Amino acid sequence: MAGRWIGRRWLPLGLIGLLLSAGCGGKRATPKTPVAPPAPTLIALLPDPETHVTGRIRVSNEYGTTDVSTPRGSLRITATAPPGPAKPLDEAEVTRLFGSAMSGLPPAPRHFTLQFKFESDTLTDESAAQIPAILQAVRALPVPEVMIIGHTDTTGERKSNVALGMKRAMRVRNILTDAGLASATLDVTSHGEGDLLVKTRDNVAEARNRRVDITVR
């Protein structure tokens, strides 16, 4: 029988082949676990909570572009296909998907307009009645900011109207601080006749332009 020496021992060649085969076949490759593709990303266009304007967005990747301009319009985007198509979400779906995130947003700013008697810093009776609502809106916020902007109509000189607008704004500021609001939360300025609510020619007495605009946020 043919054979060979292994160290100091002699083994048959057939047995050597059997040993080599057993050594080579002892390990098997572990099968790889298939990796799921990443989930699509949902993009939705929601109206502005203050103005209710929807606006427009354009979503693009290397495969294409889709425009979204309808309220609550949404689409899904992946890395392997064009974005879209755009489909509207109903109110219940918006609440389910984005309710927790939307609840964490700060409340929308509140706006108030107070009007004044001709060439004075005296509030009209209707405007004076709005003061409690303004105070309530400010006190409802943990860290409020209040912008007070005075305006005039186009009667009188432009420079004097800036001063009159400031006088009206300061009048409102004093009313609010006398009611207990911190002066540090109030920002006061005047636009004079430079930002008319109702556009008029020069030297036109327009009651709606004699005002103070207040934004609470």
Image (tube, rainbow, N blue to C red):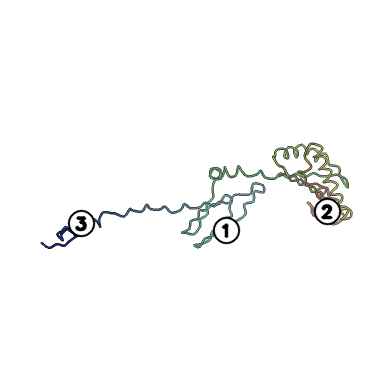
Say left or right for 79 vs 27.
right
Q: Are marks 1 and 3 in contact (CB under 8 Å)?
A: no
Measure how far apart labels 1 and 3 are at the Cα level: 68 Å
Which one is earlier in the sequence, the residue at label 1 or at label 2?
1
Residue named by callout 3: 19
Which structural element holds mark 1? strand
Q: Split into 4 quadrants, where in the image is the N terminus?
A: bottom left
Residue 29 placement (x, y as % from top left): 31, 55
Residue at image mark 2 = 193
Q: Earlier in the sequence, mark 2 or mark 3?
A: 3
The residue that mark 1 highlights is 58
Coordinates of residue 141 in the picture (x, y in percent): 70, 40
Q: Amino acid at mark 3?
A: Leu
Q: Which residue is found at the position 81% from the left and 52% from the top? A: 191
Q: Estimate the spatial distance between the alpha carbons at disc 1 and disc 2, rounded to whole Å.
A: 39 Å
- Neighbor class of circle 3 (other Cα within 10 Å; few <14, some 14-19, many 20+) is few
Assign a secondary structure to mark 3: helix
* Residue 202 or residue 169, whichever sits in front: 169
Q: CA distance from mark 2 to mark 3?
A: 103 Å
Please say if the residues under marks 2 and 3 sit with CB atoms less than 8 Å apart.
Answer: no
Compared with 123, 193 (above or below) is below
Is 60 left, or right, of 204 in this rendering? Answer: left
Residue depth check, mark 2 versus mark 3: number of the one nearer the observer? 3
Q: Residue 89's spot in the image, x, y percent? A: 54, 48
Along the viewing direction, whichever of 107 and 20 lies nearer the viewer: 20
Residue 191 drawn above or below residue 91: below
Q: Secondary structure at mark 2?
A: loop
Q: Quadrant of residue 67?
A: bottom right
Three-letter code, disc 2: Glu
Q: Amino acid at mark 1?
A: Arg
